[in-house]
Image (cartoon, rainbow, N blue to C red):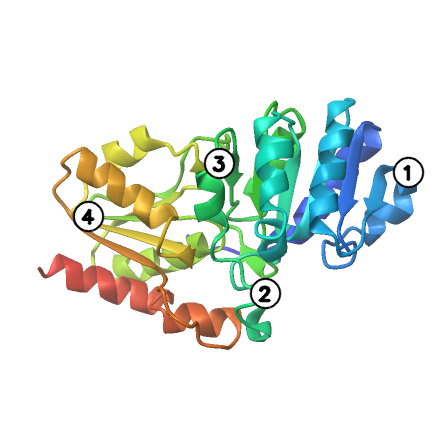
Amino acid sequence: MSSSIGKANLEVFAETLLGEAKKNPNIIAVTSDSRGSGKLVNFGENLPNQIIEVGIAEQNLVGISAGLSSVGKKVFSVSPASFLTARSLEQIKADIAYSNQPVCLVGISAGISYGQLGSTHHSIHDFAVLRCINNMTIVAPADNFETSQAIKQAISFKSPLYLRFGKKPMLDISHDNKDFKIGKAKFITKGEDVLLIATGETVQRAYLAAQILSEKDIHATVISMHTIKPFDAETFINESRKSKVILSIEEHSIHGGLGEQCASIIAQNNIKTNFKILGIPDEYMINGTQSDVLDHYEMSPEKISKTVLTLLSK
């Protein structure tokens, strides 16, 4: 099934948030020098009383957001993921999660979206650190549809939430499957040979790899595990027991993210399969565009399909 190129998920986030905020004056966007990079210029022009700019001060961003939430505002805290989930981690832990403030933390330019700016700006640690914090839900939408639904569900979400967005225009891979629920895995394709489980922008790479494999008469199930926490273990276990090979694919460190969550479940449930984690290894990362880096670390559709063939031959 062919897929068309849509917008960057970040753009859909901004458009959806503006549409919802026009109907709900309690929705507030708080940004840390990221009105432009967060695609919120139009939001600010249309709703100047519903946006707050704190400057390059991510700790203040989270503290202010928690305060606004405590008096009944629905706050979307928008900041580059690399800084939001590192510099202000203590405030996320204490002011948001421990205090149970239903703030939506929005990590923009996540993963390796910053490309040649390098490792100082990459966010390949965010899943790992936030998974360790109690009362934190983590969501990385795969395409424009998942993004719009995540924003709409975030507005009524009653506990802390982290949303992760990159900058690249995304394929429409939802097709006829318009079911989206935070905490529930979403099927992109279904097959009986291989399970490709991915999150965020790597889902489209898994989908394209599945198309390559289908030409070789190998049929893959592709799952968008958009919610990293809480993890839909039931769906994963059911699909894992059917698959000869399982591959996890993520724009994140191989430590502490989607792959290690999958490995833990496979081991604890005694699932017999060939399993491999694809992600960013524990090394000084190469420099280049987002696509260059993902391709280098075996996450191009061609290399994903080749890895599957290797595992099937064992």
- Indicate which disc residue 121 carries: 2
Which amino acid type corresponds to the residue marked 4 in the rendered image?
Asp
The percent coordinates of residue 213 (x first, y second) are 26, 59
Mark 2 or mark 1: which is in front? 2
How crowded pointer 3 is (Cα within 10 Å; few <14, some 14-19, many 20+) is rated as some
The percent coordinates of residue 164 (x first, y second) are 56, 48
Q: Disc 4 designates what residue?
A: 193
- Indicate which disc residue 308 carries: none
Q: Disc 1 designates what residue?
A: 49
- Indicate which disc residue 133 carries: 3
Mark 1 or mark 3: which is in front? 3
User: Which mark sits nearer the N-terminus, 4 or 3?
Assistant: 3
Q: CA distance from mark 4 to mark 3?
A: 35 Å
The percent coordinates of residue 209 (x first, y second) are 34, 60
User: Which mark sits nearer the N-terminus, 2 or 4?
Assistant: 2
141 with respect to 248 (left or right): right
Name the secondary structure under disc 4: loop
The percent coordinates of residue 261 (x first, y second) are 32, 42
Mark 4 or mark 1: which is in front? 1
User: Which mark sits nearer the N-terminus, 2 or 1?
Assistant: 1
User: Which mark sits nearer the N-terminus, 2 or 3?
Assistant: 2
**Camera sees residue 157:** yes
Mark 2 or mark 4: which is in front? 2
User: Which mark sits nearer the N-terminus, 4 or 1?
Assistant: 1
How crowded pointer 1 is (Cα within 10 Å; few <14, some 14-19, many 20+) is rated as few
Which amino acid type corresponds to the residue marked 3 in the rendered image?
Ile
Vertical arrangement, residue 160 with respect to residue 267, above or below? above
Q: CA distance from mark 2 to mark 1?
A: 30 Å
139 with respect to 284 (left or right): right
Q: CA distance from mark 4 to mark 1?
A: 53 Å
User: Which mark sits nearer the N-terminus, 1 or 3?
Assistant: 1
